[in-house]
Amino acid sequence: MNDWYILIGILIAFVLFTVYKYVKQKRILKTLTEDEFRQGYRKAQLIDVREPKEFDGGHILGARNIPLTQLKQRINELRKDQPVYLYCQNGSRAARAAMILNKKGYKDLYDLKGGYKKWTGKIKKSKKANI
């Protein structure tokens, strides 16, 4: 019987932690439609948090590639006084990137609803992708 209480306690803790992370993420990161994203990203820092091979395969015109896996080491490349527009393939890595940035004091954080795979605007492919 004690084993069941422990298992239920762990399950409840996991659910509460998941809900906490979701609520915090929604509070610090504003998800924008493609039209809203287009209106603001040219006046902001546009960051693609996908890996370099994904970026080389195609990215939003004007984006800089700072992969989520390198973000903590390269965070000094971003300015705190300008909005940061994030995107990844579908949105999950951008949300994790926003959590990292928020912990370091970045406040004006946005992401593209649906990520790059839903983007219909101008893109650029790297010459490296063709090799």
Image (cartoon, grey):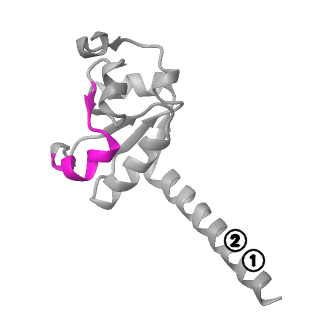
The answer to whether 33 is drawn above or below residue 23 in the figure is above
Question: Which structural element holds mark 2?
Answer: helix
| Quadrant assignment for the C terminus | top left
**Residue 52, horizontal then vertical, whole percent:** 29, 30
Q: Quadrant of residue 41?
A: top left
Q: What amino acid does circle 2 point to?
A: Leu
Residue 42 location (% of width, % of height):
28, 24
What residue is drawn where x is 53% and y is 60%? Answer: 21
**Residue 20 coordinates in the image, percent (x, y):** 56, 64
Residue found at the far bottom of this picture = 2
Q: Residue furthest right?
A: 1
Please report the bounds of the magenta region as a residue range: 63-76
Question: Which amino acid type is marked by label 1?
Answer: Ile
**Residue 67, magenta (yes or no):** yes
Check whether the beta carbons of the residues at disc 1 and disc 2 lie within 8 A of each other.
yes
Q: Residues within 10 Å of mark 2 (few under 14, many from 20)?
A: few
Of helix, strand and loop, which one carries label 1?
A: helix
Q: Nearer the viewer, residue 128 or 26?
A: 128
Look at the image and tell me in which quarter the N terminus lies: bottom right
For mark 2, what is the residue?
Answer: 11
Q: Residue at x 37, y 34 (%)?
A: 50
Q: Residue at x 26, y 38 (%)?
A: 66
Task: Judge left or right: residue 35 versus residue 109.
Answer: right
Where is 42 relative to 4, above or below? above
Q: How many marks?
A: 2
> Where is 55 relative to 81, above or below?
above
Q: Which residue is mark 1?
A: 8
Magenta portion: prevailing SS class: helix
State yes or no: residue 118 in magenta.
no
